Image: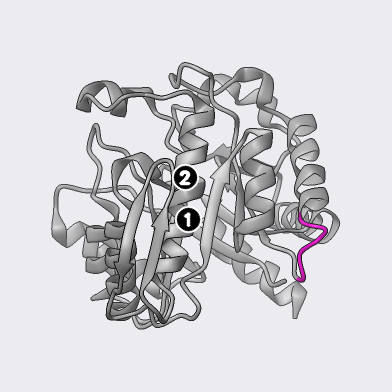
């Protein structure tokens, strides 16, 4: 599987800055422009932002990392995704998760159900999405969603549907993603109260355990899912990109993982990426939106040159 690079793009109050960011990525080695999905703070609505990005790009794939399932009904999401895939001429990659950030729920009055309930609801939502994108009217009666004779048009350009990325850090979610997703995005498990990362789940040992779990759960599939990880910081020659506040407290624990790429030269970073790709099957690296991309652009090109 080829190596790919994605970037989650930080929002900006200026539409001109947003357009400039999109055009810069379009002319770079980056493969995928991604938008995350939180309701509070300075955030773009992801599907609207990606529709705008589609107007200023032709090569970049466009993705969400990841939509919180609880924020929208899957039939509505299926309609929006099909429309966006059409307008982007088949470039959408739809990332979806169960939802985790407690502040989003508290500030909007949505109930923060136990993880098992949120996961069950997300699994039903995936069935509705796939059914809504099929070529025939679709009905579904579940514990959380019901649709009757749903017949959406237009369908997505990508058939049978845009690639589904599913992200998570817990064992139940990762097993499900390994069986059902096109792309499995490995994250850190969040605390049960939804207020941050579980510090016990940060580091090399948890990552290796998750990779083994994914391989085991995906063994019955006819093809293996693509595996992605987030690159939280890059340090080349002692110069470290800005570290996202969500992982700043766990910075040292990230050493030795692809989430923190450290080396004295760009070639050292290339070697690390190739190691994780060739030895552990990680082929999709997603850089955080607080990172300075400039040092990584030649790294991306060198990685591809090594794999030709």
* Residue with the mark numbered 2: 122
* Residue 73 percent coordinates (x, y): 30, 50
Specify whether residue 220 is painted magenta.
yes
* Residue 28 percent coordinates (x, y): 45, 71
Q: Is residue 111 left or right of residue 264?
A: left
Residue visible at 51% across and 71% down in the picture: 29
- Quadrant of res 198: top right
* Residue 236 percent coordinates (x, y): 62, 46
Q: Magenta residues, as a range?
A: 218-222
Which residue occupies the foreground of this view, 88 or 4? 88
* Residue with the mark numbered 1: 126
Is any part of residue 304 visible from this angle? yes
Specify whether residue 32 is painted magenta.
no
Q: Is residue 12 left or right of residue 101?
A: left
Q: Quadrant of the N terminus?
A: bottom right
Cα separation between marks 2 and 1: 6 Å
Q: Quadrant of the C terminus?
A: bottom right
Residue visible at 35% across and 68% down in the picture: 24
* Residue 192 percent coordinates (x, y): 52, 18
- Quadrant of res 40: top left
């Amino acid at each position: 599987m080829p190596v790919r690079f994605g970037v989650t793009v930080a929002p900006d109050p200026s539409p001109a800055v947003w357009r400039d960011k999109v055009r810069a990525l379009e002319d770079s080695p980056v493969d995928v422009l991604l938008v995350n999905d939180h309701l509070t703070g300075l955030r773009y609505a992801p599907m609207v932002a990606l529709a705008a990005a589609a107007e200023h790009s032709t090569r970049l794939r466009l993705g969400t990392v990841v939509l919180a399932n609880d924020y929208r009904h899957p039939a509505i999401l299926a309609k929006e995704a099909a429309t966006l895939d059409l307008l982007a001429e088949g470039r959408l990659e739809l990332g979806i998760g169960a939802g985790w950030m407690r502040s989003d729920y508290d500030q909007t009055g949505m109930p923060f159900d136990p993880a098992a309930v949120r996961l069950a609801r997300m699994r039903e939502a995936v069935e509705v999405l796939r059914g809504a994108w099929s070529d025939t009217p679709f009905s579904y009666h579940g514990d959380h969603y019901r649709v009757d004779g749903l017949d959406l048009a237009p369908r997505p350009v990508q058939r049978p549907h845009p690639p589904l990325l599913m992200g998570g850090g817990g064992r139940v979610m990762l097993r499900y993603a390994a069986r059902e997703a096109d792309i499995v995005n490995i994250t850190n498990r969040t605390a049960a109260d939804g207020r941050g990362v579980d510090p016990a789940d940060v580091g090399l040992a948890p990552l290796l355990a998750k990779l083994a779990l994914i391989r085991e759960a995906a063994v019955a599939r006819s093809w293996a899912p693509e595996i992605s990880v987030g690159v939280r910081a890059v340090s080349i020659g002692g110069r470290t990109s800005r570290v996202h506040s969500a992982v700043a407290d766990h910075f040292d624990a990230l050493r030795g993982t692809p989430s923190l790429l450290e080396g004295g030269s760009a070639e050292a970073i290339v070697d690390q990426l190739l190691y994780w790709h060739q030895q552990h099957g990680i082929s999709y690296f997603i850089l955080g939106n607080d990172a300075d991309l400039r040092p990584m652009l030649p790294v991306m090109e060198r990685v591809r040159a090594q794999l030709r």
